[in-house]
Amino acid sequence: MRWFPALFLLLGWANMTMGDDEYPRAGLLMEPKELAAAAGKVVILDARPQPNYAELHIQGARCADHQEWSAAFGEGDDPAGWSRRIGALGIDADTPVVVYDENRQKDAARIWWILRYWGVKDVRLLNGGWQAWFAARPGFGSGTPVPPQAKDFQAQPVAEKLATKAELLRSLDSQSLQIVDARSEAEHCGLEPLKNKRAGAIPGAKLLEWDDLLQEGSGRFKPAAELKQLFADAGIDLNKPTATHCQGGGRAAVMAFGMELMGAEQVSNYYKSWGEWGNDDDTPIEVPPRPASDNRAQP
């Protein structure tokens, strides 16, 4: 059973020799029974909206409203603000944290990535999220708990986790970065522009839809062998420095998590994503054809 001993807290999960049925960094995930057994030893963050949290949550969990965090991240240049926000949750750089949501990991992964960006070393996702915990029923809480004792957290950005437009533009010439598009195929192929001025793809980007990493109808990640095949089929090299992107950083965070789960060590999130790239008249765009074998309805 995966566990939280000190040996694992600082990347002890990485790159062990494992079979195809095991994730190379299995310690990035926790199962509900494992989390229940770790009660009191970890900080549990609920990434759902505050009303959902107040109605019912995992016993002992603290609220980290995804919408609030998403809006607050901005340029990733407010260490003082994030020191207060994260420290107020009783978290410092060495606190083990587990995050969950009810949105197929998309919201929890954003919180996971933001915490990692600001220097919290050991952050994990609850495999299956709120739905898995609710089904297992280890214990619940409701209402607004007593605020935890704040910690003196000094947020320090881990710059290599955040990709920028300038870096991606440079990489188009140097091929120094592998770009992975976590959006839908319709967005990637320019068929679904959303509210962007332009639609299409960053030239050379590899497409793998974020929710292809998850089992259908749940927030559980697919088995390691299936993920390995998915990445291979998409032409994604887990050993190459990579920047993931989507529309606004959330789906890209799921992709970054999935790649790290499968052993990738150099993964950044182009957090501004297509919301920036597709609305800048000076960024290059290509419009890949939709595969002829794709019989799904056009948007």
Image (cartoon, helix red, strand yellow):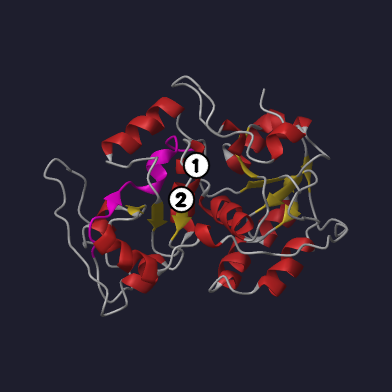
Residue 60, image x, y percentages: 80, 46
Indicate the position of residue 112 as horizontal and vertical percent values.
60, 52
At x 17% / y 62%, what residue is drawn?
287
Give the vertical position of 34 relative to 140 (above or below).
Answer: above
For residue 252, say whether it is visible.
yes
Q: How many marks?
A: 2
From the image, which quarter does the N terminus lie in? top right
**Numbered disc 1: secondary structure:** helix
In x, y percent, where is residue 214?
Answer: 44, 38
Residue at image position (37%, 41%) is 212
Q: N-terminal of the two: label 2 or label 1?
A: 1
- The reply, left or right, for residue 39 in relation to residue 70 is right
Identified by mark 1, the residue type is: Glu
Asked whether 74 or 267 is in front, the reply is: 267
Amino acid on which disc 2 is placed: Val
Mark 2 falls on what kind of element?
strand
Q: Quadrant of residue 179?
A: bottom left
- In the rendered structure, which segment of residues is drawn in magenta? 200-218
Viewer-proximal residue, 283 or 239? Answer: 239
Determine which of the numbered discs, if any, sits on residue 260 in the image: 1
> Are dots 2 and 1 in contact, CB under 8 Å?
yes
The answer to whether 160 appears left or right of 176 in the picture is right
Say whether residue 277 is magenta: no
Q: Is residue 61 above or below residue 221?
A: below
Q: Quadrant of the C terminus?
A: bottom left
Q: Label 2, label 1: how many angstroms apart (C-alpha)?
A: 7 Å
Q: What residue sits right under mark 2 in the picture? A: 267
Q: Quadrant of residue 82?
A: bottom right
